[in-house]
Image: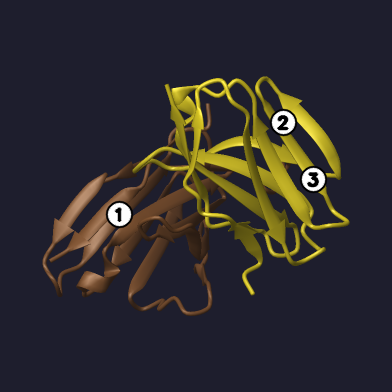
Chain colours: A yellow, B brown
Amino acid sequence: QKEVEQDPGPLSVPEGAIVSLNCTYSNSAFQYFMWYRQYSRKGPELLMYTYSSGNKEDGRFTAQVDKSSKYISLFIRDSQPSDSATYLCAVFKAAGNKLTFGGGTRVLVKP
Amino acid sequence: GAVVSQHPSWVICKSGTSVKIECRSLDFQATTMFWYRQFPKQSLMLMATSNEGSKATYEQGVEKDKFLINHASLTLSTLTVTSAHPEDSSFYICSAALPAGGPPYEQYFGPGTRLTVT
C-alpha cells in the first residue's frame, strides 16, 4: 500500500467551477500536509500547508485535513484556465525529515 | 526569495556516458538539499538527501554508486548519473530546505532537468 494515495485524473472542469481534489494517507504519524502545483516540465510550487485538522483558506484555495479519516482535500474556487496543472499532495513527519508525495492529479480547466 | 536553479534544463547523452546536474540555491544557504526523480505522469520519488559537507543518504533501492551526489557548499549540490542507460531517462528535480529554524517541511524546488539517454 502506498503511503499517500491520490486519484490521477484527469479532472476536467469548466472555467468558474469548483475543483475538488483529495488524498488519503496511511500513517497517522504524518504531521504536516501540503499541496503543490506543478506545471508541465516544471518543478512543484508550494500552494498551501496545514498542520492540524480543519480548514485553511488562502484566496481561492481551501485546504482541509481530517486526521481521524487520514483524508486531505484541496478546493479551488472560481477556477481559471491558468489553474490547469498537476496538483500533488504531500505529507511530512519530522522524524523522517522527508516529504512523501501522492501521485498527482492532472486538472484541466476549460475556458 | 528562496529561488532554486538547476542546470542544465535538458540534456541528451549517449548510453554509457556520465552526466552531471547542478542544483543551486540562489538567495539562501541550504544545509540540506534533496534529489527527486519523476517519470512521466508519475509523482516525485525521493532519491537521496544531501547535507552540506557529509555523505548523502540514499533511499532504499537507489544505487549510490550510480547516482553520485556531492554537496560541497551551502548553495550547490550536484547529481552525477554515471554510466547512464536509457532506463535512467527521467525528470530529475532538486529541492533545498531553508536553514534550521524554519518549518521543517518547507522545501523550494528547482525547475527540473530532463535527461534523455539514447
Where does residue A63 sit, x and y in percent of width and height? 73, 36
Answer with the quarter of the image where residue B35 lies: bottom left
> Taking A8 as reference, is A71 left or right?
right
The amino acid marked with disc number 1 is Ile
Q: Is residue A71 above or below residue A85?
A: below
Where does residue A80 sit, x and y in percent of width and height? 50, 22
The amino acid marked with disc number 3 is Val
- Report how far apart the C-alphas of labels 2 and 1 lie in the structure: 36 Å
Q: Is residue A89 above or below residue A107?
A: below
Residue depicted at 14% across the width and 61% down the height: B13
Residue depicted at 75% across the width and 63% down the height: A95
- Using the rendered image, report if marks 2 and 3 lie on a common chain: yes
Q: If the image is split into quadrants, where does the C terminus of chain A sit?
A: top left
Residue depicted at 58% across the width and 37% down the height: A46
Pointer 2 local density, CA inside 10 Å: few below 14, some 14–19, many at least 20:
some
Q: Nearer the viewer, mark 1 or mark 3?
A: 3
Q: What kind of element bears circle 2?
A: strand
- Per the image, the residue denoted by label 2 is A62
Please report, as a chain letter, where disc 1 is located: B
> Taking B89 as reference, is B63 left or right?
right
Residue depicted at 35% across the width and 60% down the height: B79
- Per the image, the residue denoted by label 1 is B21
Q: What kind of element bears circle 1?
A: strand
Q: Nearer the viewer, mark 2 or mark 1?
A: 2
- Per the image, the residue denoted by label 3 is A65
The amino acid marked with disc number 2 is Thr
Q: What kind of element bears circle 3?
A: strand
Where does residue B8 sit, x and y in percent of width and height? 25, 46
- Report how far apart the C-alphas of labels 1 and 3 lie in the structure: 37 Å
